Image (cartoon, helix red, strand yellow):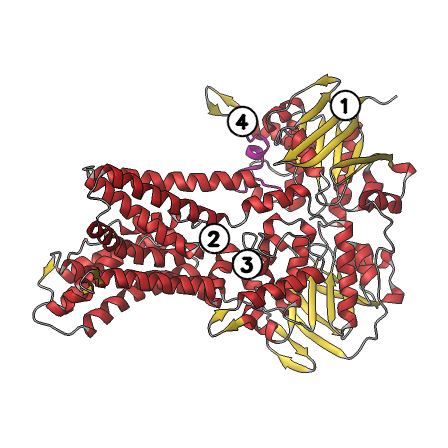
Amino acid sequence: MYKTVLEMRNIWKSFSGNVVLRDVNFTVRLGEVHGILGENGAGKSTLMKILMGIYSKDSGTLLLDGEEVDIQSPKQALELGISMIHQELNPVLDLSIAENVFLGKEITKYGLVQYKEMQRQALEIIERVGLSVPTKQTMRGLSIAQMQQVEIAKALSWNAKVMIMDEPTASLTEREIDALFHIIRQMTEKGISVIYITHKIEELFRICNRVTVLRNGEYIATEEISETNRDHLISLMVGREIGEIYPKEDVDIGEVVLEVENLSVDNVLSDVSFYARKGEILGVAGLVGAGRSELMETIFGLRTPSSGQIRIHGEPISITSPRTALKNKMAFVTEDRKVTGLNLIAPLRENITLVTVRQFVENLRINKKKETDASNLYIDRLGIKTDSCESQVKDLSGGNQQKVVIAKWLLADPDIIIMDEPTRGIDVGAKRDIYLLMGELVKQGKTIILISSEMPEVLGMSDRLMVLSGGKVMGVLDRNKFEQQKIMDMQFGAVYH
Amino acid sequence: MMSMNEMGQNQARKGRSNLQALVMLFVLIGMFIVLSLLSPMFSRVGNVINIFKQTAINGILATGMACAILVGGFDMSVGSTVGLSGIIAALMATGGQEGLFLPVVCSVLAGLLVGVINGVAVAYMKVPAFVVTLGTQSIVRGLAYILSGGRPIFGVSESYEKIAGGLLFGKIPYLVIYYIVIALLMGFILQCTVYGRRMYAVGGNAEAARVSGINVEFIQMSAFAICGLMGGIAGMLSTSRTVSAAPLTGEGYELDAIASCVIGGFSMDGGAGKWYGMIIGALILSVMSNGLDILGVASYYQRILKGAIIIIIVLIDVRSKRKRT
């Protein structure tokens, strides 16, 4: 018999008349890891925000240890033992680890903060999550994984019974993910329940006991992880059978388009050489810190190389800024759409034409009619879901935002398209749209360089795969030689000959 | 997939800065009606023209300030720039010097130069706009004192006086015409040109603009340059209007210029604001002070009111943003 810790019954929630949660039921057992799966907009985060007291529910019941509770604020949630580790951590970087752990409940005596005592207690807590660094140190010096451990420690310091983790592995390396899962297992052994939100279905099978699927604000099912499989979960999530996940097109690969020779950037890249051909998808794998994004930034003129040469169609060129990269018909769908891809407060139209707005100029004026037509063309072509091209981009879901970034570059008609984590944090349906689009683009004779931390994605989509480690090329594999284990070894520095 | 909820919020949020400008237009009309009822003096044609005349200098500064705010900065030095360029113009238009070319060009270029220095420091040297422009505020004011010997300069030539003091059709002051032309020109630049679009892009997300091939530093620098240029123009006109210049002319004008933009819907975070907003904002400020003058409220109270309004409007902006996330 399992003991239920948390129960959410018949939860309804609507925003300005639109129902976003429709009679949702959800239970968490003592000491389990409970996955929540759903596309963007399925209601996962709304449900969690109700649990954390950030939103209030319209109706429904919330039971904690069998007792009805009414959570009005995050502070109350914390006091009741419910904590959340957000996807984007927001530590106070210039405060010490101890101060971050005790943020909001500093230990005081006669109104004075007791730093020594806080540092001592903080050390005890962070050691419980396997972190051993001086707690006097500021957060700034920590890696993302370590900051996350501090966040978990902070939750533990509130005596968390239920810990919500929102995409906790999004910016972790494989090794750090293993460490995180180890921490999660230790916590569950001590009777803490974890609610685990992720887009990576593979992870559910590694860490979860059960998984609940939401779709369009409705509760669909809760499954024991041992009794379900990947395809079944996907079909529950999207409400239809999804065909092959990685629709790889057969394309005739042509001549070499981009050649990079002995490219080095101080402390980041050393002697990187590779080429990419017409009609080809060149995958780039590597751990965080391997220099993948840095390599692409250098090729695109955002970083200055210390040595090396780049040739496009055989012509040596010097790319000193994104403008020269653009002139050479390159495009760069960057890693983080919110930071480097989009102007969130501008309408879709202005984002889509950000690169190419000069095309629409007549007598100094931007011809808005033509601009709107072009935007709408790409909104249709990429299936961007929006009510108008005048809507602000920040109101779109992640998948649709990503499509806006891609539309922006496609309008420039590039020959070489660099895509850095193009499907990060977006739902399965939008992922598939992007894969299909990639196939369409290489068929048109374009070259795609695909960087991804999701191994199945690079394996599924690439014609060749280059593996980087520590700023060096470990090897380039042809599609018929793809082996996950070999690639993992290369990521950790094994050279492939 | 976008949920119903997201779509609903979409419509509600669309064009918030348009909305604020529109709301402020109604506020302006409302103020006008109320003041007309309170005082019959207020709605006389003479007074309305007077209001526009009072708006012109601040309005011109606001068009420049709008650029600096759009790219994510602001300019605290613009009031001092008015003082410096006013003194330069006066020095070249007094003592029997009748020529217009020298005083006009030199005073306007002085403003541009201050703007370029601000812009280079902010955009290329990455010094925070607050620090840079607070520093130049003091430096430029100091220069104005040195050039003038710390004394006001009187006796501006008649021809120079006519630059701002002349009347079109014997009724509309040239000053008002300049303001309208500059505001419309700026409206065209912001609304219709690639350059204007890029200011919004840089203010909205500089990193995304950079990756998209936009010369972010140049756009930021030039926005500050325009702001300085407007300071120069305003100083040049101010000397003509008052037929004199004092080294402390323009003190505190930066506050009015910033207030005009903020009231008109420009976000201090950059990247948002409509061109007509800065006009409405500037008009609201001068209707307010004109009305309060007529009602006999001392200007000391007006200063308190102005400061409070800026804080309240930014507060509303911040709160509405918080609600949306």
Q: In the picture, which quadrant includes the C terminus of chain A?
A: bottom right
Q: Is residue A409 visible?
A: yes
Q: Which chain does the residue under circle 3 lie in? A: B
Type of amino acid under label 2: Ala
Q: In the picture, which quadrant includes the N terminus of chain A?
A: top right
Q: Which residue is mark 2?
A: B272
Type of amino acid under label 3: Glu
Q: Residue drawn 75% across and 31% down?
A: A24
Which region of the structure is painted magenta? A87-107
Type of amino acid under label 1: Val
Q: Is residue A250 toward the left or the right of residue A256 in the image?
A: right
Q: Secondary structure at mark 4?
A: loop
Give the foreground label among 4 and 1: 1
Q: Is residue A294 visible?
A: no
Q: Which residue is mark 3?
A: B207
- Distance between the Cα atoms at labels 2 and 1? 47 Å
- Distance between the Cα atoms at labels 4 and 2? 39 Å
